[in-house]
Image (cartoon, grey):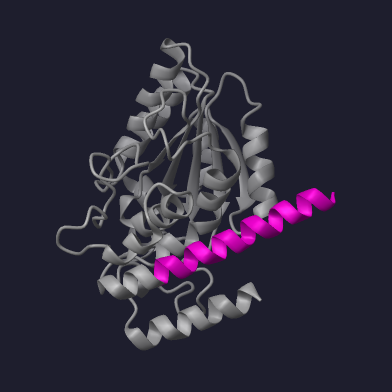
Amino acid sequence: MESREKELAVLKATANEIRQDIIRMLGAAGSGHPGGSLSAADIVTALYFKFMRIDPENVKKQDRDRFILSKGHAAPVLYAALAQRGFFPREELLTLRKVGSRLQGHPDMKKVPGVDMSTGSLGQGLSAANGMALAGRLDGRDYRVYVLLGDGETQEGQVWEAAMASAHYRLDNLTAFLDHNRLQIDGPIEEVMSPEPLAEKWMAFGWDVQVIDGHDMAQILEAVEKAKKVKGKPQMIVAETVKGKGVSFMENQAGWHGSAPKPEEVEKALAELLADKL
C-alpha cells in the first residue's frame, strides 16, 4: 500500500511539472492551446510514466507501445511528457511554434522523436490507431496502442466510422481515452453539437467502457490496468476532466481553448501550480 501511495505521489508531482511546462512554453510562444493541454495532463502522465513501453534511445523500436494524440492542438502536453521522458532536451520546449523549431503547433512524426502520428485534423487519430493495432496483431507483436480524443472531436463522423472498425476487428490491444472536459473552441459541446450520451454510444458501438475522474491518478491507473485485461473488445475510458485544470482563472473557461497566457498570467499560473506542488 505504501509503495502505491508513493507511486501516486510521484505521478501527481510529474503531472504538475508537465502543467508548469505547458504554461511556460505557451507563454514563450505567445500562442497555442492551454485549456485542453492542461485537462489531459494526468492521463498523459499516467501513460508515459507508468504504462507505455518506450525507449528514448530507440524511438522506432518495433515492439514499443504507441500513443496518438488525436486532438493534436493539445501538442504542448505531449511535448512536455516527451521532454520529461528524455526524448529531447527540456529547454527545447521554449521553442514551441517558433520559426525553425521542430515543435510545431501540432505534432509532426517526421520531426519530433517519440511522436507516433502527425495529428491536427480532428477526427483522424482513431483511424490511425486502428491501423497500428491491426498491424500489431498481424505481425504477432504484443504492443498496445493508446489514443486520446477530445469530446468536441467526437462530433466528427470519421470517429464513429473508426469506432465501428475497432469493434468489428475486435482490437483488444487498443485503449482510447476521451478527454471529457465539455468545452470546445466555440463553447459547451452540448450547445455546439452535442455528442452525448458518450459512454452509452461507445458501448453501443461494441466497446468496453469505463467512466472515471480524469484527474484522479488512482482511478486512471486502475482503469488502464482493467482495460489491459479486456479480451475481444477495444476499450474506451471516458475521463471526466476540467478544461484548464490546475490554473484557477483558466478552469472551465472556453476562452482558454486557444489563447496563450500573457507574461503576468504566466507568473500567476505558475505561482498556483508551484503552491499546489507544495
150 or 270, nearer to the observer: 270
Q: Is residue 104 above or below residue 166?
A: below
The spot of residue 111 in percent (x, y) is 24, 44
**Left or right: residue 140 compared with residue 122:** right
Residue 2 counted in the magenta span: yes
The spot of residue 12 in percent (x, y) is 63, 60
The residue drawn where x is 48% and y is 36% is 54
194 or 50, nearer to the observer: 50
The spot of residue 151 in percent (x, y) is 42, 52
Residue 69, located in which quarter of the rendered image? top left
Q: Which residues are magenta?
A: 1-23
Residue 6 counted in the magenta span: yes
Residue 121, can we see it? yes
**The furthest residue to the left:** 99
Residue 90, located in which quarter of the rendered image? bottom left
**Left or right: residue 114 compared with residue 271:** left
